[in-house]
Image: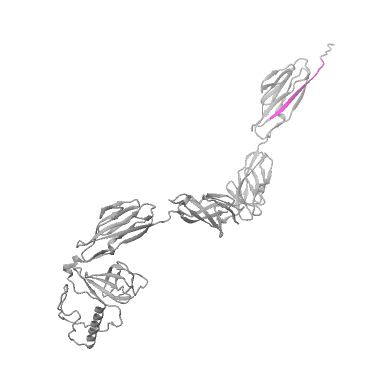
Amino acid sequence: MENYTNPKNAQIINVKGEIHTDVAENTLLKVGDVIKAGAVLNFIKGSEIVLAYADGSQHKVYSSESESVNEIRVDIISPDNNTESVDSEDINNIQNEISAIQDLIDADIDAELPETTAGLTSNEGTSFASVNRTGDETLAQAGYDTTEQNNIFVLPGDLDNENNNDNFALFDADESVTVAEDTSATGNVLDNGASAGGPLSVINFSVDGNTFDAGETINLVEGEFTFNADGSYTFIPADNFNGTVPVVNYTVTDGAGNTDSSTLTILVTPVSDLTDADESVTTAEDTLVSGNVLNNAETADGPLTITSFTVDGNTFNAGDTVTLAEGELTLNADGSYTFIPNDNFNGAVPVVSYIVTDGAGDTDSSTLAISVTPVSDLIDDNESVTTAEDTPVSGNVLDNAATADGPLTVTSFTVNGNTFNAGDTVTLTEGELTLNADGSYTFIPNDNFNGSVPVVSYTVTDGAGDTDSSTLTISVTPLSDLTDDNESVTTAEDTTATGNVLDNAETADGPLTVTSFTVDGNTYNAGDTVTLTEGELTLNTDGSYTFTPNDNFNGAVPVITYIVTDGAGDTQRSTLTISVTPVSDLSDDS
């Protein structure tokens, strides 16, 4: 391996074989790399490199391919494209001259330099300069060690760059870029170009056999490509495209009219289009929950499928049904799932991790989180009871209550907007109510009250502290207070019978009235006078009646049935029975 020390900052414009620096021995140098002054280049036999310097000069540095000769050669490329080579003998002479100069510096002797191997006569393409000292001076110091080196500094002569740069070599390396699917690729192909002949520009480019001027935008099957004269380019891949874009061949020119052809290769790497958001669902205690985990999934590459899922560290195939401490879970290949909570379970179900795949074989991992919210097991149906007027009613509001969590208790109740503790007795307009903690209750209606009692709302609690609100509705049905005993009267033959059927009637609800009466199957309005075979009968609304027997009649008059009503609209059916006793018609005139 041969070494070469770079004399000043340079950029690599061409490289052949394997060359690396002593700083990064495992990294091969490539076109476009910048080499700092003093950097040591290590050459594998047969390797070569072209270095371009800021002053426009170029050096071609290469190692011998001879197995028996170990040397580095340098070709100095002049502005007129002539090449001057320096071999190993020249290298030795140059090193000797460096040593001699250092000896003079050490001795502080201002002596004439010995004549160089090349002599004192200037060569073509070089010039001399006279330098006068002005002001402070800086003296060269010895100390640059050149002993036992297998490398050299080669300094080109002062070239007439101002007049001859147009003939310098133009070089532009090929480019290769990689970008992800659906991501634009941008860059500049001239970043790897170099020329001493002036600024570089792209003249034209060709793709798929078609040539375009720099600055044009072309549409390819693979995407949209723009290539500008300044070397900048943009490639926008078509949606979901991945693969190799047709190679772009382009021509570069410099200010001197030199040209070079290079290529731009763009590769688009595939990216999975499959996305599936995590799911989170909530269900109430003792309530089944179902859904589909693929509702939030998307892909451009064919149908989606669940392949497997994991719960509690155990992995199952899609379609399996898993029995958990919390309930039963099924997750199918089409993404549908069902979770049936165990009785009375509430809380978080272990997170379900599942794998989704699409038609392109891309996969994604997502999760399904199920939460079961608690629900009170305490239920207490509303109660509704009916009692007759003036009749107490009692019962237990907890007879319709149930819970899985311990004994039930009534804690309070509310009537007419007022709240009372269980066990209190409340006096209402309608009657007296007591509701105890054990759910037992009693309602005593006020005298003659009938109708609806204000609804009683009460609160029940169980051993788990769950509560439920229910109601007790009490209705009092009316009873008639009207009573009217049946009447029975007797009168003598040919004697009128009178009286009042309401004398034996009672009510708490206003005045009594006879509304109608029936005799011999015929019904008459109160106040009507009815002629019977037995005599003549009148029964008035105030209950008064008159029966006048026919002459010489005696016996039973047909029973009279009548209807009595009171101020409350209550009615009562009663009867009037009239009997006519015989009287002797015998007379003794004497």
- Judge from the rendering whether residue 244 lies leftward or rightward of residue 319; answer left or right: left
Q: Which residue is nearer to you in this view: 207 or 333?
A: 207
> Residue 497: which quarter of the image?
top right
Query: Main structural element of the magenta stretch: helix, strand or loop?
Result: strand
> Residue 588: which quarter of the image?
top right
Q: Quadrant of the N terminus?
A: bottom left
Q: Count the marks: how many? A: 0
Q: Which residue is depicted at the point 74% across and 23% down? A: 559
One can see residue 241 in this view: yes
Q: Which residue is nearer to you in this view: 364 or 250?
A: 250
Q: Position of residue 83 (x, y in %)?
A: 21, 71
Query: Does the magenta segment cover residue 581?
Result: yes
Query: Does the magenta segment cover residue 501?
Result: no
Q: In this view, does 26 lie above or below 394?
A: below
Q: Is residue 259 above or below residue 414?
A: below
Q: Residue lying farthest top?
A: 590
Q: Where is residue 584 in the image (x, y as percent from the top left)?
A: 82, 16
- Tell me the colour scheme of the image: one colour
Q: Which residue is nearer to you in this view: 288 or 317?
A: 317
Segment tinted magenta in the rendering? 572-584
